[in-house]
């Protein structure tokens, strides 16, 4: 794998993360109403799961290595 291939792959992962975060913030009112003071996980512009404890959420999602395509955000 060349450096250029790695950089292109990283850019694609960042784009997925950006799209997931954009989707989350477009729907923030919903998350604020139903998941206030919780962490929410978003992947492919879809809600995956939520928890008040980040560690429990990550464990439940079985994220062993950092998955750039899953956005996890705390809802205030």
Image (cartoon, grey):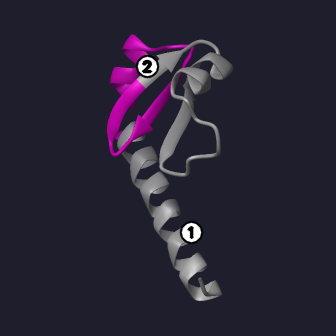
Query: Looking at the rendered structure, which numbered label has been put on residue 32?
Result: 2
Residue 63 picture location, percent across and down:
58, 35
Q: Residues within 10 Å of mark 1 (few under 14, many from 20)?
A: few
Which residue position holds label 1? 10
Quadrant (top left, top right, bottom left, bottom right) of the N terminus: bottom right
User: Residue 11, percent across and down?
Assistant: 52, 71
Report the Cα–Cα distance between label 2 and label 1: 31 Å
Q: Is residue 64 magenta?
A: no
Number of numbered labels in the structure image: 2
* Label at residue 49: none
| Image depth: mark 2 or mark 1 in front | 1
Q: Residue at x 53, y 20 (%)?
A: 60
In the rendered structure, which disc, 2 or 1, sits on the residue that comes first in sequence? 1
Front residue of 4 and 52: 4
The residue that appears at 43% across and 57% down in the rendered structure is: 16
Displayed quadrant of residue 28? top left
- Could you say where residue 34 lies in the image, as x and y percent from the top left? 38, 12
- Answer with left or right where residue 70 lies relative to residue 74: left
Q: Residue at x 51, y 41 (%)?
A: 71
Q: Is residue 48 above or below residue 8?
A: above
Q: Position of residue 72 (x, y in %)?
A: 54, 35
Q: Which residues are magenta?
A: 26-48
């Amino acid at each position: 794998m060349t450096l250029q291939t790695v950089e292109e792959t990283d850019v694609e992962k960042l784009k997925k993360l950006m799209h997931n975060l954009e989707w989350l913030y477009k729907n923030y009112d919903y998350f604020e109403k139903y998941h206030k003071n919780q962490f929410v996980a978003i992947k492919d512009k879809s809600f995956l799961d939520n928890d008040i404890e980040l560690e429990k959420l990550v464990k439940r999602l079985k994220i062993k290595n950092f998955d750039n395509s899953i956005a996890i955000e705390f809802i205030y």
